[in-house]
Amino acid sequence: MSELFEGHRPLVAILRGVQPHEITDIGHALLEAGFGIIEVPLNSPEPLDSIALLHREFGDQAIIGAGTVLTTQQVDQVVDAGGRLIVSPNTNVSVIQQTVKRGGLSFPGVFTPTEAFTAIEAGCHALKFFPASLHGPGGITAIKAVLPPTMPVLAVGGVSVPTIGDWLKAGSDGFGIGSNVYKIGWDAAKIRAEATAFVKAFDAANA
C-alpha cells in the first residue's frame, strides 16, 4: 500500500450533503468501521465548518479534506480550516499546484490519459478516475498500463461491495465511496454498517 495513505486503507468516504451538526457522529462511525480518509464536498451545507470539526476531533487519526474543489481560493479555505486532502472532479493545474504549495494532498479528477499526465506533471499525489463507471475495470487496466507505476489510481463512481474485487484486480489502488456509505438522512449506525461492509470486502479482496 502506498505511503501516501499514511497507513489507512485507500478508501475515501465522500460525504456529499453532510451537515456540521451530524459530522462528528458520522466521523466516529467511519473510523470505527475502518475508514481513515474523509472527504466533505464543498457543495455540501457549510462544508468548511464540517471540515474544521472533523479536523478538531480526528485530525490526528484520519486524513480530512474536501471534494469538489474548483478554485485556488477554495484550496486555501480548506487548508485554513484544517483540511489536507483536496479532491476535484476535474484536472485544474492551478488547483493542483496551489494544493502542493499549501502542503496538501492533491487527488484531481481525470478521465483520459491526457488529463492524467497533465495532472501528474502539475504535481498531483494520486489520480481520481471519475466517473469510473464509464471506464469499467477494463478501462482502468488499459489506462494504468501507460501511467507511472508508482502513481496511485483511485476509482470513483460505480464501485460497490460486490464489485470491489474486480476493480482491485484491474489495477485500482483505492476508491472514493459516496452514496454507498453515506446518503442524506442516514444515521451513524447505518453509515457504520455500510462502511463496515466495504472494509470487509476490501480486506477480503486483498487477502
Image (spheres, grey):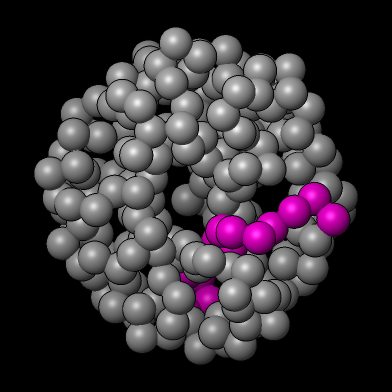
Identity of the residue drawn at 70% across and 75% down: 137
- Taking the magenta stretch, the answer to whether it contains residue 161 is yes
Camera sees residue 113: yes
Q: Where does the N terminus fall, quadrant-wise? A: bottom right
Using the rendered view, name the quadrant where residue 115 is placed.
Answer: bottom left
Magenta range is 148-162
Q: Is 163 placed left or right of 48 in the picture? A: right
Using the rendered view, name the quadrant where residue 2 is placed.
Answer: bottom right
Task: Say if 126 sits above or below 7 in the image.
Answer: below
Viewer-nearest residue: 26 or 168? 26
Query: For the image shown, how many numbered marks are present on the structure?
Result: 0
Task: Say if 89 sits above or below 169 in the image.
Answer: above
Using the rendered view, name the quadrant where residue 132 is placed.
Answer: bottom right
Camera sees residue 66: no
Q: Is 98 placed left or right of 184 in the picture? A: left
For this orientation, the residue located farthest to the front is 185
- Taking the magenta stretch, the answer to whether it contains residue 163 is no
At which x and y percent is residue 168?
Answer: 73, 65
At which x and y percent is residue 81?
Answer: 25, 25
For this orientation, the residue located farthest to the left is 73
At which x and y percent is residue 5?
Answer: 52, 46
Q: Is 30 placed left or right of 98 in the picture? A: right
Identity of the residue drawn at 72% across and 34% down: 195
Task: Say if 96 sits above or below 141 in the image.
Answer: above
Identity of the residue drawn at 62% across and 34% down: 182
Viewer-nearest residue: 18 or 78? 18
- Looking at the magenta stretch, what is its main secondary structure? loop
At which x and y percent is residue 68?
Answer: 35, 49
